[in-house]
Every structure is written in structure tokens, then in C-alpha cells.
Amino acid sequence: MYDAISSDILSRWTFPMVPDCNLFPGQSYLRKLNGVSAENDVVASNSAKLRKCIVGKHSSFGDNASVTNSFIGRRCKIGKNVTIRNSFIWDEAVIGDNTTIDQSIVANSAFVGSNCNIPIGSLVSFGVRISDDIKLNKGTALSLVTREGIHVAPDTALLGPTGKGAIYLDSLDGDEAMLEDPASLQKSLIYSLTHLSLSAESVSTFNSHADSDSDDD
């Protein structure tokens, strides 16, 4: 649902609930070229390529950065030659030079180093830090804490010498988890993101043939 609604917003199916209507206090979105809606004080290099994305205030983009079909939060720092596709980058995230992020979520205050690859279906949770030159496996979920909120020891073998966080593991599984916490029914949706695809048609376009059918239809 998060993915589907976000796709609707990017495609402006939710009008007037679109960013540049600035329905909430403190918002300053303007509609720009190439399907971009950006707030005030966004700084982008002349060579940066932003297409069909939403960008929060005080975020910046380095030379030759490419962002497509994605959401960028406030106060984010996107480095040089970064490629972000079909992804969600939340507030105050930092993405180092020459890094690629594809169809993933990078949460608040997360840090992804230079020359990294965050592949399809990854979740980099709040405050996680990934060192330079790290290539994650598809569908990796990283967190600073366990399901119970206990802080984990940094997995430097996976995330590099300056890394913070580890693979997210749910200590309860199956029927036991459902009895303990009904919210666990949704864990497979929350922590398995490989089917997120902002590039796919959203739920609002199902069975819609407005472009090809007659006016009566």
C-alpha cells in the first residue's frame, strides 16, 4: 500500500493531495520540469538529472547524480555520480559518491558510503551506517536494533570497518509470533521489499482504458 499510494502521488492521481498544493504548514513544494516537485533550498548540480521525483527542502545533489521515480526527504546529501531508481530516501540520509540504490528504502539519518550497491528490495533502517565499497545482497534488511529494541553489535564483516547495524532478524517466527504480536502478520510485507516497484502501474490504474476507449466508455 505504501508503494502503491506513493506511485499514485508521483503520477498525480491523488490531486489535490499532491506535494505542490502545500496542504500542510511549512511545506514549500513547487512543480518543476521532468515531473519533479521540490521544496525550497534544494541544491542540484547543473549536471544532475532528476526525473519524476519528489524532493524535500535543503537536500543536495552532486555532479551527474541521477534520481528517477523516487522520493528524497529533507536535508539529504546525495553525492556525485549517484544513481537512485524507484526508491525512498528519508530525511537526513547521506549517500556517498558513485553509489547505486535500486528499488529500496533508506531511512532517516542512514549513511551509505561511496562506491556501494544497494540492490532491489533492501531496507537500510534508521541510523544504519554502511562503509565505502560495500555491495549488499538483494533483499537485505539492516537495523541497529532487534525486534525487541535491543541494540545489535555492528556487523563490520558485512558493513565495513565504520559500519553500524546488522541483518535484521525476527526472534519470533510462525504461529508463535502471531500469538505474541498480531502485527507480526505484516512482517513479511514490511521487511521483504523485493516486490516494491514504483515503476509499475499503481492500483488506481487497474482496468483503466481511458486513453483507448470511447468517451461513452
Image: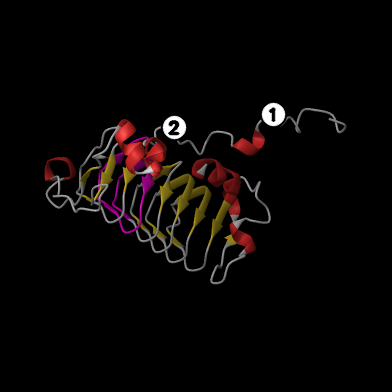
Q: Quadrant of residue 87?
A: top left
Residue pictured at 84% horizontal, 29% vertical: 214
The answer to whether 138 appears left or right of 32 in the picture is left
Count of number-bearing discs: 2
- Inspect the image, locate mark 1, and give the three-letter code of the amino acid beneath it: Asn
Q: Is residue 31 visible?
A: no
Residue pictured at 32% horizontal, 31% vertical: 174
Question: Among all residues in the image, which is located at the extreme right?
Answer: 216
The answer to whether 151 appears left or right of 36 in the picture is left
Q: Is residue 54 visible?
A: yes
Q: Nearer the viewer, residue 2 or 158?
A: 2
Marking on residue 195: 2
Residue highlighted by disc 1: 207
Residue 118 sits inside the magenta stretch? yes
The answer to whether 137 appears left or right of 17 in the picture is left
- Inspect the image, locate mark 2, and give the three-letter code of the amino acid beneath it: His
Q: Which residues are magenta?
A: 94-120
Residue 124 is situated, as x and y percent measured from the top left of the image, at 31, 47
Residue pictured at 64% horizontal, 48% vertical: 12
Q: Quadrant of residue 90?
A: bottom left
- Residue at disc 1, secondary structure: loop
